[in-house]
Amino acid sequence: FHSNRLSEAVDSYSVAIRVGLEELTHRKEMVSRMMGSGRNNNSSAGAADELLLQLGTCLSQVHGDLGKTLEIAQKFPEAKVEYENGLGMLQTTCHLSKGDERVKRLKMDVSRMDRATSVTEERRRQTVIVEGTLNKLNQASNSAEQDSARKSVISSLKKLLRIEHNSLGSN
């Protein structure tokens, strides 16, 4: 019951953020074009327009918000992409250094999503193994096969529990 509502809320929030992101991206492109056509010889090529920096920071925040939304929905690969997009906005549009707190935070988010993705994949693989060993146990015809299948089930369940235990510390 609650998970269905949470899923709907996350989807709704995700759509709203994407609409805002599209609008901000459009505005950034407009500002970039205006800056490109309005430059004269007296202005330095490296000087950044304050509005463009603000929009880049806003875009980064929106990507981060969408990444967080997807993370809540446990869509880790998609969340990683959004966090990377936000990081790219800060580094390329805003020219922020690696020492900036926002850059550090987004880098941590990206690495956390890498770990979450790998744990999810490992958990999925081990769950398939557990299901296979349970099927073997159910199909065992004599006590020797049952004992062997039970040992396999216990071993595969221990591995799954170890993955679950390790994931609690890494996410």
Image: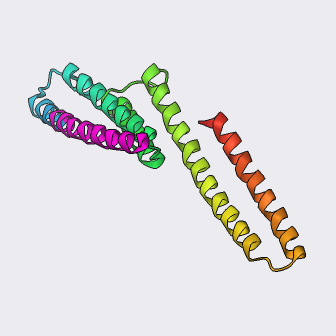
Residue at image point 87% right, 68% down:
147
* Residue 67 point in image, percent of width and height: 40, 38
Of 47 and 16, which appears nearest the observer?
16
Question: As drawn, is 169 to the left or to the right of 62?
Answer: right
Question: As drawn, is 147 to the left or to the right of 126?
Answer: right
Q: Quadrant of the C terminus?
A: top right
- Is residue 165 in sight in this rendering? yes
- Is residue 47 in sight in this rendering? no
Q: Quadrant of the N terminus?
A: top left
Quadrant in which residue 164 is drawn: top right
* Residue 127 point in image, percent of width and height: 64, 59
Query: Compared with residue 30, is residue 140 higher up or lower down, i.e. above or below?
Result: below
* Residue 52 point in image, percent of width and height: 22, 26
Of 47 and 78, which appears nearest the observer?
78
Question: As drawn, is 63 to the left or to the right of 29?
Answer: right
Quadrant in which residue 135 is drawn: bottom right
134 is within the stretch colored magenta: no
* Residue 18 point in image, percent of width and height: 25, 41
Query: Compared with residue 34, is residue 78 higher up or lower down, i.e. above or below?
Result: below
Give the farthest residue toward the bottom. Answer: 141
Residue at image point 27% right, 36% down:
17
- Start-end of magenta stretch: 1-28
Residue at image point 75% right, 58% down:
156
Magenta span dominant secondary structure = helix
